[in-house]
Image (tube, rainbow, N blue to C red):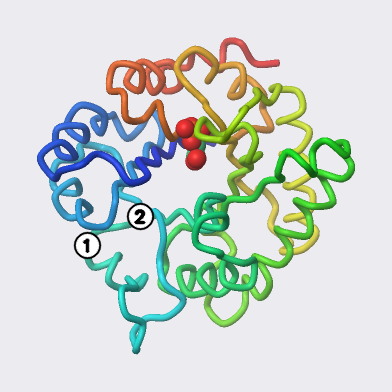
Amino acid sequence: MNKLIVANWKMNPGTLKEAISLARKTGAIKKETGELVLCPPYPFLSGVGKVLQGAALGAQDASISDSGPYTGEVSPTMLKSLGVEYVILGHSERRREFGETDGLVNRKTLAALRTGLRVVLCVGESLEVRKRGISAARSFVRQQLLRCIRGVGKGGSSKRNLIVAYEPVWAISTSKNRKDETPEDTARMILFIKDTLGKQLRVSAPRVLYGGSVDEKDVCNFLSRSEVDGVLVGGASLRPGEFVQLTKDVFTGLCDTLKL
Ligand code: PGA
């Protein structure tokens, strides 16, 4: 299966002009070599979508419903009409800054899957939880995941379009006192997530990505592990030189040659 790279631009860059320039520099790949998704902020989706060459378009959030009295919200159908194929849901920044609960993320996940979007569902434990040990982290991630995927596969919400991103909150570049997650622990957690998804949804090969300060220097450390199906990249995706190098390394098979 091709490795998947998802670029989460978060609330960057500042203008449409800069967004288009970044997309021109980083969104050109040969489709046969791998899957690349650029996720700009909502107002730039349409403009960025027009200049992508080979990369797919993703959004960073979507609403719980397709229409209705939800001031300020953007529906999955609206996103699809702009050519969006992927949507990141449940990111830890949305949980922390905007109070998103597992229940809300679940409603968003079901709505997006019903519309035919591919969902990149983020899960991951905080530092406090991780300090209690790996088994506490596993049980936190399991619970979070199960709550967020409740009902997936029913009522037209395709389970095949569900991708999970394991992002330990303490490894994200913008977290205070961030620390590096090791590729070994990442691989173990991802295997655990796959096992949980397999049992819960009865899917045979669920895709699970890793995210947390991945850059061109360490991407192959994670992707040389066969358990890791791709990466969700924040900060480094805004630095064209680094990001192009990162995608090149992954898509030209460099990480595969290091397979562990
Ligand atoms: P980071 O962001 O690569 O800057 O740590 C990843 C994310 O928050 O999705």
Q: Quadrant of the C terminus?
A: top right
Say which amino acid is labelled 1.
Leu
Above or below, 251 relative to 217 = below
- The residue lying at 79 percent from left, 49 percent from top is 195
Q: Position of residue 235 (x, y in %)?
A: 41, 30
First in residue order: circle 2 vs circle 1: 2
- Which residue is label 1 attached to? 82
Q: Where's residue 12, x and y in %?
A: 29, 41
Residue located 35% across and 32% down the image: 32
**Front-lying residue, 139 or 206:** 139
- Compared across the picture, whether 196 is left or right of 13 comes to right
> Which residue has dot 2 on it?
59
Which quadrant is home to the N terminus?
A: top right
Helix, strand or loop status at disc 2: strand
Residue 7 point in image, percent of width and height: 39, 38
Rendered view: 147 above or below 69: above
Q: Residue at x 41, y 19 (%)?
A: 246
Q: Is disc 1 surrounded by few (<14), some (14 to 19) or many (20+) residues within 10 Å?
A: some
What kind of residue is marked 2? Answer: Ala
Residue 147 visible at all: yes
Q: Which mark is residue 136?
A: none
Is the residue 237 above or below the residue 215 in the image? below
